[in-house]
Amino acid sequence: MLGFIDQEYGLKAEQIEKLGHYDTFVCQNERYIIVPARHRTEVELNELYQMGLYLAAKGNLSVATIVPTKKGKMMADGNGQPFAVFRIYPQLYTRTVPIGKELAKLHAHGRLFPAPVVHCKRIGQWKELWGHRLDQMELFWKEKVQTKRKEEFDNLFIESFPYYAGLTENAIQYVADTELDEQPYVVDAATICHERLPQALWVEGKEIKLPTDWVYDHCARDLAEWVRALYMRNGAAADEQMRRFFREYERVTPLSAFSWRLIYARLLFPLHYFECVEGYYLTESEQEKQTYAQMLRSLVTHSREYESFLASFYERLELAKRFQLPIIRWLSYA
């Protein structure tokens, strides 16, 4: 690997060290990190490169910046595995402010990103992306229904899919209604978000911010996925953490009714179910299959509790005092 790094990047490193999940090395007193880029394209990485430079110029020293290869490419291919090399700040990142506040500041800077974003853009696309994902899973579900030999997971998937398909359709309709009913404000402009905020290790105060974690979307994406992770981890006990998170965020950037409705729509969309089913059928690891099977059993068993959480979401955050936000009627009977 060291020889390959020298060949592709002209960086002469003496040894590879571990930083969390990643390999790092030092060259001429600069520290670099090697990040897999399997699910990214060259044009996406170029946009992320510009975002990283922009945030670093704004004084965000925890942002890693992509180092182009000697040929000017954003990633290299080593043994069939695409990866990108990032330059990181020599002093390792330690988060010293609440996650809600730091996220709000990141989003505030991201809304002012001056360059056009095409390939990493997700804002305004939720309905189409969710609909496409639902259609794909429905086709797969129909195949499984016709399959004679079924495992336990297959049966649970077959039985549960119609329910989660209904939730997805509710989420899509909720986004459509929001776009018709509500006026977006400055806070609703596209910003630098995360594909999955809870999986970005900087939130634990351990590692730097990696552009490969980012997409260009509405801030509701990050806010909803953080809440989803809190609920999945702690259930109803997450209420106080959730309220504190939003208090921290809104001290920097107050949210609009449009924002809150998008947060709610994203929580309605059963992303946790889709990722569980997709993960089970894509992995070849028996251990991972068992983990996904246990996860699906838990999701189905506790589906009524999640309905209750959704039905009372606005009430838990005392939003009725500030906005008139529509609820999904059938959830109130959970």
Image (cartoon, rainbow, N blue to C red):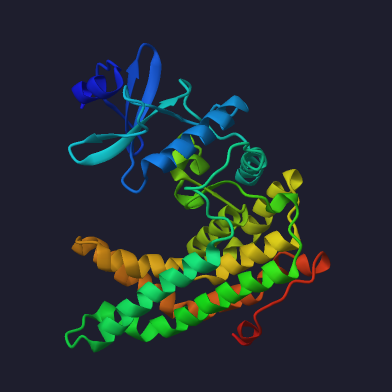
Q: Quadrant of the N terminus?
A: top left
Q: Position of residue 96 (x, y in %)?
A: 60, 34
Q: What residue lies at 52% left-to-right and 81% top-to-bottom?
A: 304
In the figure, residue 81 lies in which quadrant? Answer: top left
Decide if residue 14 is in sight here: yes
Left or right: 302 with respect to 23? right
* Number of numbered discs visible in the structure rendering: 0
Rendered view: 21 above or below 28: below
Left or right: 193 with respect to 201? right
Left or right: 250 with respect to 24? right
Q: In which quarter of the image is the C terminus?
A: bottom right
Q: What residue lies at 51% left-to-right and 75% top-to-bottom?
A: 168
In the figure, residue 286 lies in which quadrant? Answer: bottom left
Viewer-side residue, 137 vs 200: 137
Q: Position of residue 15 (x, y in %)?
A: 24, 20
Decide if residue 62 is in sight here: no
Rendered view: 316 above or below 300: above
In the figure, residue 273 lies in which quadrant? Answer: bottom left
